[in-house]
């Protein structure tokens, strides 16, 4: 079985990981915005969103409730659409797969290679080498769109 060049595989895996990071960030951003609106509303109006039973709290409170409902709907849709993909990616790159985990720590969590090395118990240089092993493992597992989109000639083996 012919293996693609490590540079090609690395860029494809990085593109996939950046996609996963963006999906996860969208979910966390919606959660943050929900928390912000809840805190602002509870602080300003003394409203508790745990048991909303009636209106009449004033226009700004009503606007906050509408914003909150919209954001919670957005969050729910994001989770429904993306949670399974993010969770599967996290499992693929869990601590039991050292090379994949090293790549995840660098690309998704944004750690420097020094920090990755510290996390997995190796030098930064060795962490890079280990991550390349993870790239070789992940490349056949990632969706085709992240291979053919970047490098049209890099088809699945």
Image: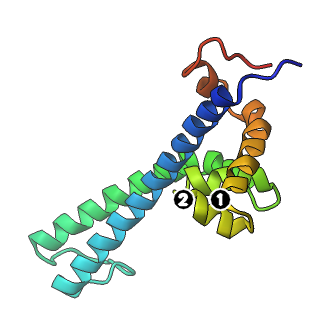
Residue at image coords 33%, 61%:
69
Cα distance between the residues tagged 2 and 1: 8 Å
Residue at image coords 41%, 64%:
31
Left or right, 36 with respect to 60, comes to right
Residue 76: where, in percent of width, then height?
48, 55
Residue 20: where, in percent of width, then height?
56, 45
Residue 39: where, in percent of width, then height?
28, 79
- The answer to which quarter of the image holds residue 85 is top right
Q: Looking at the picture, does residue 17 appear above or below residue 6?
A: below
In-front residue for pair 155/83: 155
In-front residue for pair 7/13: 7
Q: Looking at the picture, does residue 19 appear above or below residue 48?
A: above
In-front residue for pair 154/130: 130
- The answer to which quarter of the image holds residue 95 is bottom right
How is the protein colored in the picture? Answer: rainbow
Residue at image coords 55%, 22%:
150
In-front residue for pair 130/71: 130
Q: Tell which residue pokes out farthest to the top in this image.
A: 153
Left or right, 40 with respect to 7, comes to left
Which comes before the other along the chain, label 2 or label 1? 2
Residue at image coords 56%, 49%:
107
Contact (CB < 8 A) between labels 2 and 1? yes
Q: Is residue 90 visible?
A: no
**Quadrant housing the N terminus:** top right
On the image, numbered disc 1 is attached to which residue?
124
- Dot 2 falls on a residue whose secondary structure is loop
Q: Is residue 70 visible?
A: yes
Q: Which mark is residue 112?
A: 2
**Quadrant housing the C terminus:** top right
- Dot 1 falls on a residue whose secondary structure is helix
Q: Which mark is residue 7?
A: none
Left or right, 15 with respect to 46, comes to right
């Amino acid at each position: 079985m012919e293996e693609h060049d490590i540079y090609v595989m690395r860029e494809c895996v990085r593109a996939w990981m950046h996609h996963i990071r963006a999906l996860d960030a969208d979910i966390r951003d919606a959660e943050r915005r929900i928390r912000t609106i809840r805190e602002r509303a509870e602080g300003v109006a003394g409203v508790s969103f745990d048991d909303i039973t009636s209106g009449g709290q004033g226009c700004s409170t009503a606007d906050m409730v509408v914003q909150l409902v919209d954001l919670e709907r957005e969050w729910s849709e994001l989770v429904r659409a993306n949670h399974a993909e993010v969770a599967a990616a996290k499992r693929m790159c869990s601590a039991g797969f050292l090379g994949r985990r090293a790549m995840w720590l660098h690309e998704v969590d944004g750690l420097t290679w020094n920090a990755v090395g510290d996390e997995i118990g190796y030098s930064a240089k060795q962490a890079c080498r280990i991550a390349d092993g993870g790239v070789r493992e992940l490349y056949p597992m990632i969706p085709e769109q992240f291979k053919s989109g970047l490098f049209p000639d890099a088809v699945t083996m």
